[in-house]
Amino acid sequence: MFGFVVADAEALSDEEKERYRSLYCGLCFALRDRYGQLSRACLTYDLTFFVLLASSLHEPAEVRGASHCVMHPVPAVARSWSRSPWTDYAADLSVALAYHKALDDVTDDGSAKARAAARLLAGAYERAQARIPEQCAAIEEAMGRIRTIEREGAEADPDAAAREFGTLLGQLFAHNQGFWAAGMKALGCALGRFIYLMDAAVDFADDAASGSYNPFVALGATPETMRTTLALAAADTAEAYERLPLVQDAHLMDAILYSGVWAQFNRTYTP
């Protein structure tokens, strides 16, 4: 359900692109340091967006540097990175969410690739459970409820699973946000619902062919009706986002939330 919350590169200045890369690389190095090299496969831009949000709200001290990266050996130059305590939390969430995504894929289709991923991440997930036990429990419970909804198929409320994923992301975003907890929870709820629906829209053809649960398939949606539903969900996300007093990196986050999140939909449905 991740991979949608990315920046529209064409809307960014060179300085913003470098800032974005540095936070993304910081998250990658945090995964390596906290969970080992294999955990870097859990890296997503979605959690980089969370780091941007939390950093803009709280303006924590950041540790910056440059390191060579085994994931990008060519060209052999050091890559700039930036980290804060929010980066470490995002790394913990990355592992927990990736592990449960692998388990979900195993349940869906028994994928050998997903089984291998779950086995490889099992040890890292145990460490994540020790660091963020409440969040891991919330993820386990929410994914269980989502699987129950999806098993109901066409009988289920078509928005139920999307709302459930939104509720989960709201909980994860609100952690340790202090005065901004309610605002971050609202944003996480709206964004999580949007992500679930966007995933369903992009996977429409594959799910229709395989018979996998998809709320848009169940409704017989067209690209036009899916776009309308997603636009309304995006508007809810934008409303919650605009209530937060975000100044640092605001234009960069705008390029994610107002255009970047549509990239996969546009690639899928633009002739």
Image: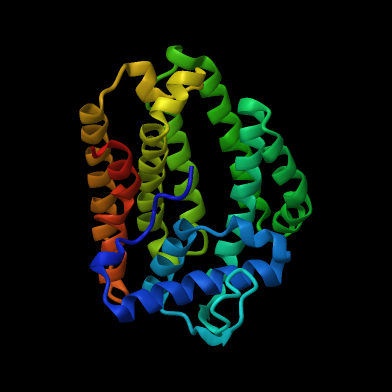
Outermost residue toward the front in this view: 74
Using residue 231 as the reference point, say whether residue 5 is left or right of it. right
Q: Position of residue 184 (x, y in %)?
A: 39, 57
Residue 74 sits above or below residue 193 on the image: below
Q: Quadrant of residue 190?
A: top left
Inspect this view and state whether residue 37 appears. yes
Q: How many marks?
A: 0
Q: Residue at x 61, y 81 (%)?
A: 68
Q: Quadrant of residue 76?
A: bottom right
Task: Specify whether residue 246 is in view.
Answer: no
For image coordinates 25% across by 24% down, the residue present is 222
Q: Which of the colour schemes (rainbow, by chain, secondary structure, one colour) is used?
A: rainbow
Residue visible at 51% across and 20% down in the picture: 210
Residue 181 x, y percent position in the rendering = 42, 59
Q: Position of residue 204 (x, y in %)?
A: 39, 28
100 left or right of 259? right
Which percent across, then down, holds residue 97?
A: 59, 48
Q: Quadrant of the C terminus?
A: top left
Above-or-below relation of 93 to 103: below
Q: Nearer the viewer, residue 184 or 42?
A: 42
